[in-house]
Amino acid sequence: MNPLKISKLTLIGFFTLSLLFSVSCQKQRVVNRDALADSVKTEFLHAWNGYKKYAWGTDDFKPLSKQGHNWYAHSLLMTPVDAFDTMVLMGLSAEISEVKKLIFSRLSFDRDISVKAFEINIRLLGGLLSAYQLDGDQRFLNLARDLGNRLLPVFDSPTGLPYMFVNLKTGKTSGAVSNPAEIGTYIVEFGTLTRLTGDSVYFKKAKKALKELYVRRSALGLVGTTINVETGAWIDRSSHIGGMIDSYYEYLLKGALLFDDAELRQMWKTSVQSVNTHLADEVDGNLWYGRANMDSGKIQKTWFGALDAFFPAVLALDGQMNRARRLLDSCFKMWRLKGIEPELIDYKKTEILSPEYALRPEVIESTYYLFYFTGEHKYREMGRVYFKSLKKYCRTDEGYAALKSVVTKEKADRMESFFLAETLKYLYLLFEDPSKIDLKKTVFNTEAHPMFIKTGRTVQ
Ligand code: DMJ
């Protein structure tokens, strides 16, 4: 099918409906909104102003040394692009104008640099597509299309599984050893690009990658941690829901929802059933997900981390509320171990394996979903705890800093763009009126960039 182009007017009308409060909702808004939403906005501006003052035009702000940092030889404006739609949701009009000026005057992808395609896809392509859909400025879509075209060569492997890196100027690819997350996290952005441009190539390549990965699952239905994209052979056969696998599962479900795709839905159903059968682990009445060999299904490591905490959100989105609730309760316990969340723990021994906190969003994201679907006050109370910890341990005089250790609370000189794109966005949405976003019409990419479901329109 040849997807239709969507006119700017239709887009603006749609987003006005989806995002702004209707007059009839005004009363309810007062009741449903928590005063903390404004405090989160204040903290967003605190962090953004640090970037603006010391790192303007670079990728990231280093909050301790107070300087900018670029991922590659040229800045790709990682923080401004990633943060833009949070500003839109928060209604920060002055910041929106200055970021637009920066992006349209400086952002170019015609650079001789080899980039990590996954990160560029979720942060930049996702950010630009969401910016276009929210703001309506055609220049966002032009940039997104240019970037999408420059990322396309990653799919030109013998299997169709994408390479890890691509040179944005030459199209030269590298990195044949990849993982399910970096292979399977394209459909939301590439499918949206197809929908917005009418060019089916993006959706097709991203879907083929998902299918090629899915057919390589083990007899138990599990995937491993690393795979060679040229041969299709698994290298590390350890299976889990954490980093390097996580958003593969997320995109099976989100791709199904965003594009009303029955095949993806079936792939998700089969996969999550295997995950729930083999990786779910009960310890002292608490639900966790451990790490098993993909062939035996035997749990070998009782490890769970900050990245795994995305899973309650996905379970809730799928209507698996009991599991979602129980797993989020476990995640919250992990947060409370040291007053802020460690990167990785052994849940059986209650032992911290990696003590850093990278300002990650996943547990807050899951709490937002649980609040959205249940309306239970308990989840906003969890939100208050996260917010208090963030301010207490990570706030600096002019920004926010990751922690080297949640035990000593020593800070690290990093404020990743996802702090503004995701962590503060989900925290804000948790305290905002839930009707601000309609999750029947909106799918967040894995970097919290909203994409919008169009009914009666499929992409193939
Ligand atoms: C983000 O870039 C995305 O959420 C990704 O899926 C996982 N890692 C970070 C946040 O922790």
Image: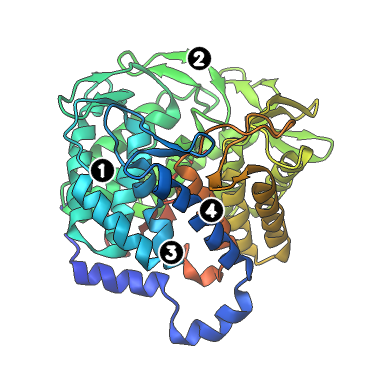
Q: Residues within 10 Å of mark 4 (few under 14, many from 20)?
A: many
Picture quarter containing residue 376? bottom right
Q: Amino acid at mark 2?
A: Asp
Q: Are marks 2 and 3 in contact (CB under 8 Å)?
A: no
- Name the front one of labels 2 and 3: 3
Report x, y in % for residue 131.
31, 56
Q: Amino acid at mark 4?
A: Leu
Please name the residue shown 15% across and 53% down the image: 2
Marks 2 and 3 sit apart, C-alpha to C-alpha, by 40 Å
Please name the residue shown 62% across and 57% down the image: 370
Q: Nearer the viewer, residue 141 or 312?
A: 141
- Name the front one of labels 4 and 1: 4
Say what secondary structure mark 4 lies in. helix
Report x, y in % for residue 284.
84, 36
Q: Please give the residue where the numbered disc 2 appears in the rendered image.
A: 236
Q: Please give the residue where the numbered disc 1 appears in the rendered image.
A: 203
Marks 1 and 3 sit apart, C-alpha to C-alpha, by 27 Å
Report x, y in % for residue 60.
41, 38
Q: Earlier in the sequence, mark 4 or mark 3?
A: 3
Q: Earlier in the sequence, mark 2 or mark 3?
A: 3
Q: Please give the residue where the numbered disc 3 appears in the rendered image.
A: 89
Q: Nearer the viewer, residue 305 or 265?
A: 305
Marks 4 and 3 sit apart, C-alpha to C-alpha, by 11 Å
